[in-house]
Image: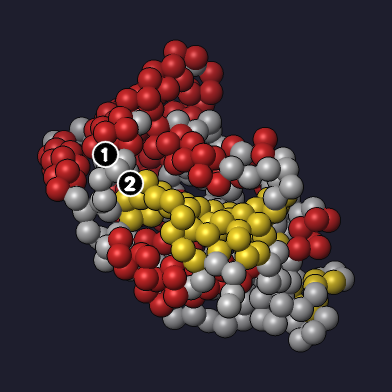
Amino acid sequence: MISPRLLDLVRCPECHGLLRGSPLTCASCGRAYPGASADFLDLRPQVAFEERTKYLDEALHADARHERVSPPLLGSKIRNDMLRAFLAPTAADVVVDLGCGSGRALVWNRDWGAATVGIDIAPFFAQDARSQVDLVVGDLRRLPFADGTFTRAFSLDVLEHLSPDALRAMLAEAARVLRPGGSLFVYTHVRRNARIAVGLRWVNALARRLERAGLIDMRQERLRKSDHLNPLADIPELHRVVAECGFRVARIRYYTPIVGGVVENILMRMAERQMARRAAARLGSHMDAAAADQEAIKAARTAAKAHIARSGTTRAVLRALTAAMKLDLLLFGSIESGPFFALLERVPPR
């Protein structure tokens, strides 16, 4: 949505001047931003960055997982619980989701009562988010906000998609729009894993065998991960990079999802594959095989979300699996590894 509060917060991404009128026009540099829809503002900068994320491609969203916000379960529940525990905003805070994707995290956390904004480079927002939270299409390397606009920020599954230069640009912009003492919560990973990650490699090897046997389909997941650039080598480099950009690591917890890998990469993919096969059988006689396969994947995702919404038993099972996945945090959360949750504190400038 586009609230009056959002219109007060946004600025020209080129010069940070005030935006006024219809279409929005910068009072300082004169640039007009006519791309606003009824649901979100389009405030992308004019500069054409050479680095372009694959998340702008329709193919990555063909399964339609972004269209509807389901309750947080499994891995998304763990991420959201850690977000709430680490960031803990209040109604007095102004919070931005940097790389908000569908906007689902903002929908899940409306009970914060805080003023919230979601920004992403790709306009694949869920209908729930479009109607309930303020949304902006923009580039994280050139944020359309004034200095010190926000008290809290978070970024989930974003940093691994950036090159080293883009990561530094994004963190520098995050530091600019955060007030001194403000916090940025991130979930991402470094390339160096702990020895316990061998368990996850075994899970992934099993997933590949099951895929060859036709029992699961990991194509969409591989397509999503093909955008990973993994700019951070290890945790010491994390500390160095965030310090260069105006932050310090205030808190960190590691997450090696071995139980989570079994649940999400094996069990859930097997269930999804069965649903996709049933959908493909219904569609096969009406379209060519490739189109039927694509539609079947989308239909399986849609059907799964609808089933979860109406079935208390299914939700109970998924909640039990989510609880099992939390063992990864309890058992391995203190072991320095690749994936991690971190709270970065904005260091006051000297």
Q: Position of residue 290 (x, y in %)?
A: 33, 47
**Quadrant that contains the C terminus:** bottom right
State how far apart marks 2 and 1 are (Cα). Answer: 7 Å
Q: Nearer the viewer, residue 205 or 286?
A: 205
Q: Position of residue 32 (x, y in %)?
A: 76, 78
Q: Which label is found at residue 254? A: 2
Q: Who's the residue at 85% across and 72% down the image?
A: 20
Q: Are marks 2 and 1 in contact (CB under 8 Å)?
A: yes
**207 relative position to 295: left or right:** left
Q: Residues within 10 Å of mark 2 (few under 14, many from 20)?
A: many
Q: Residue furthest top?
A: 313
Q: Which label is found at residue 332? A: 1
Q: Quadrant of residue 10?
A: bottom right
Q: Who's the residue at 66% across and 57% down the image?
A: 151
Q: Secondary structure at mark 1?
A: helix
- Indicate the colouring scheme: secondary structure
Q: Who's the residue at 38% across and 54% down the image?
A: 188
Note whether 27 is above or below 236 in the view shown. Answer: below
The reply to whether residue 304 is visible in this rendering is yes
**110 relative position to 207: left or right:** right
Q: Position of residue 310 (x, y in %)?
A: 53, 18
Q: Secondary structure at mark 2?
A: strand
The reply to whether residue 57 is visible in this rendering is no
Note whether 347 is above or below 282 in the view shown. Answer: below
**288 relative position to 175: left or right:** left
Q: Residues within 10 Å of mark 1 (few under 14, many from 20)?
A: some
Q: Who's the residue at 76% across and 54% down the image?
A: 2
Q: Residue furthest bottom?
A: 29
Q: Amino acid at mark 2?
A: Tyr
Mark 2 vs mark 1: which is more N-terminal? 2
Q: Amino acid at mark 1?
A: Phe
